[in-house]
Image (cartoon, rainbow, N blue to C red):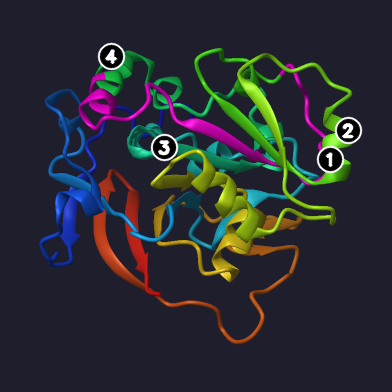
């Protein structure tokens, strides 16, 4: 299924009416011509005034699976999307807008050669993305933030060794003790945010804020997304619906849920659908969360 939806436009089907927003409170707008060929119209993210805005991006099967369990040989989003090239294009656009890209350690381990930049997903459009980020007065590459409570990482991972991509490893004191035994390149720094066995969502937010970021993109995994959602820190969700039913007996991860854990305290959060696009049989849904 490699290359499914190759080159297809993400055609707009519907969008909710938008109120005018001052330029200082938003990021994006009309895309430059080289990128607009496949994404016609506006891509704008409203920015919070009192904290960094956090948007999440996931691909899901029709039965709600966003990642396969650890018993599966491959557990990345590619297996869920059927390696949809249109999904990778949408992901690249969001990375193009973001100041930081936040991922959990599990997501890092799955993509051994992955680098969390737009150019990695769309190398033929490297110059177009660079020019777009320059027009938006953004740094050449978003900062990659890896969340790891244990510090169990491979220092040779490609995503940690791209010299032009700043990387912050956010961890606990125990995790930092483990990471201190590894050798990382100069673009990587370690930030300790607590003594416990987990990285609190609020502490992660402060790390994001400390970079000067106004827009952070969370690419998972579902456990990290669930932590941010429970803390009411997710402002928007970009959700690709892939036309497959995962139908696995193995442990699977569903959006915001990991191995049967739930939000607690009710049914969770409601979101408002704000836009729908289509590329072949893939649907690209955009949701906004209220306060």
Above or below for 267 versus 160: below
- Which region is colored magenta? 131-156
Q: Disc 4 or disc 1, which is closer to the eye? A: 1
Instruction: Determine whether, in the image, residue 35 is placed left or right of residue 6.
Output: left
Q: Position of residue 45 (x, y in %)?
A: 28, 51
- Residue position marked by numbered label 2 in the rendering: 178
| Front residue of 83 and 164 | 164
Question: Earlier along the polypeptide chain: callout 2 or callout 4?
Answer: 4
- Residue position marked by numbered label 3 in the rendering: 99
Question: Earlier along the polypeptide chain: callout 3 or callout 2?
Answer: 3
Q: Are marks 2 and 1 in contact (CB under 8 Å)?
A: yes
The quarter of the image holding the C terminus is: bottom left
Mark 2 → mark 1, Cα distance in angstroms: 5 Å
Q: Disc 2 or disc 4, which is closer to the eye? A: 2
What secondary structure do most residues of the magenta stretch adopt? loop
Name the secondary structure under disc 1.
Answer: helix
Mark 3 → mark 2, Cα distance in angstroms: 28 Å
Q: Is residue 188 visible?
A: yes
Instruction: Determine whether, in the image, residue 11 is placed left or right of residue 268.
Output: left
- Residue position marked by numbered label 1 in the rendering: 175
- Residue position marked by numbered label 4 in the rendering: 127
The quadrant where residue 252 appears: bottom right
């Amino acid at each position: 299924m490699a290359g499914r939806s190759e080159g297809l436009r993400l055609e707009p089907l519907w969008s909710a009416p938008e109120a005018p927003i001052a330029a200082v409170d938003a990021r994006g707008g009309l895309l430059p011509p080289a990128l607009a060929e496949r994404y016609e119209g506006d891509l704008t993210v409203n920015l919070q005034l009192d904290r960094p805005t956090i948007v999440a991006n996931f691909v899901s099967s029709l039965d709600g699976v966003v990642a396969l369990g650890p018993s599966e040989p491959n557990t990345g989003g590619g297996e869920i999307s059927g390696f949809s090239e249109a999904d990778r294009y949408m992901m690249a656009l969001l990375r193009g807008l973001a100041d930081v890209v936040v991922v959990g350690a599990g997501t890092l381990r799955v993509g051994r050669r992955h680098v969390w930049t737009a150019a990695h997903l769309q190398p033929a459009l490297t110059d177009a993305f660079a020019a777009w980020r320059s027009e938006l007065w953004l740094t050449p590459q978003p900062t990659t933030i890896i969340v790891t409570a244990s510090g169990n990482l491979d220092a040779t991972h490609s995503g940690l060794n791209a010299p032009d991509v700043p990387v912050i490893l956010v961890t606990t004191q125990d995790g930092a003790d483990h990471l201190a035994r590894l050798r990382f390149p100069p673009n990587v720094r370690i930030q300790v945010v607590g003594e416990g066995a987990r990285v609190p969502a609020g502490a992660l937010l402060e790390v994001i804020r400390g970079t000067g970021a106004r827009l952070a993109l969370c690419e998972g995994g579902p456990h990290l997304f669930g932590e941010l959602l429970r803390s009411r820190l997710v402002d928007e969700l970009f959700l690709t619906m892939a036309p497959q039913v995962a139908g696995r007996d193995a442990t699977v991860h569903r959006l915001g849920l990991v191995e049967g854990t739930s939000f607690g305290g009710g049914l969770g959060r409601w979101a408002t659908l704000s836009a729908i696009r289509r590329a072949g049989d893939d649907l690209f849904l955009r949701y906004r969360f209220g306060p």
